[in-house]
Amino acid sequence: MLRLWGRPSSARTQKVLWTLSEIGLEFDFVLASATMGPGGHVSKGNHPFGIVDSPEYRSLNPTGRVPTIDDDGFVLWESNSIVRYLAMQHAPDLLYGNDIRTFASASRWLDFENNELLPPQHELAMHLIRLPEAQRDPAAVEHARLAFVKALAIVETQLGRTRFMCGERFTYGDIGVGIRVHRWHLFGLDGPSVPNVARFYAEIQARPGFQRWTADPAHHLEG
Ligand SMILES: N[C@@H](CCC(=O)N[C@@H](CS)C(=O)NCC(=O)O)C(=O)O
């Protein structure tokens, strides 16, 4: 059976969890992290899930980060590569219409999520939630908020042209953006009106994969 190492509060792990759920693959989920544990972030004195510092895990993933998968002996890390692999190996029709250009378009939006939406949102998570209050910086929050809003405008424009990020049907390119839109909504910060994003957000919230692994606010707001 496929095995996944990660943690539920990791948006990168959630990309893999949501993908697995869309496909309907059964898997073992091994809780692993150096920075988060059952009680929250280690900066608040909590014990981490661990595993990632063990020689066994490092032999699978030398970065010591999550997520990692083992699919019947094929080991892979880097969340976006895992999502692409799962789509190609297990569900090309479902996740990109078995079409190379749709695959490439979805791959682009996954990279955009990683490069443009993730960095400011990571800053927001640290300075709004994860760091001890004395270390939180309102200027860092404002800087990250503006950077996120700028990237979100690009998503808004795309969703004004197409129902989903890559056209009229759901693809794996919607997963990364979908998680960031959800987390942004939960943060409750000021931002411009984005009606196309709102329509998209309502659509993805109806998907069982979103509901199972991404919806729970605790996976975004606790740390
Ligand atoms: N580029 C890597 C980054 C992996 C990464 O930074 N993962 C975070 C969780 S989102 C992590 O391992 N944090 C430390 C930990 O939880 O031990 C990927 O996309 O998989």
Image (cartoon, helix red, strand yellow):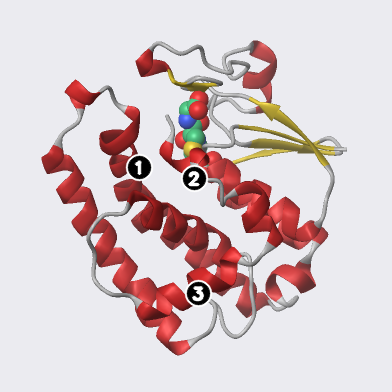
Q: CA distance from mark 2 to mark 1?
A: 16 Å
- Name the residue tied to disc 1: 122
Near-viewer residue (9 or 86): 9
Q: Is residue 174 shown above or below 13?
A: below
For the point 57% across and 14% down, the residue is 53
Q: Amino acid at mark 1?
A: His
- Nearest to the observer: residue 168 or residue 199: 199
- Looking at the image, tell me whether mark 1 or mark 3 is earlier in sequence order: 1
Quadrant of residue 132 within the rendered picture: top left
Q: Is mark 3 within 8 Å of ligand 1?
A: no
Does residue 167 appear in the picture of this structure? yes
Circle 1: element type? helix
Q: Nearer the viewer, mark 2 or mark 3?
A: 2
In the figure, 112 relative to 96: above or below?
above
Residue assigned mark 2 = 217
Going by the numbered disc 3, the residue's amino acid type is Phe
| Residue drawn at x 36%, y 81% as measured from the top left | 157
Mark on residue 200?
A: 3
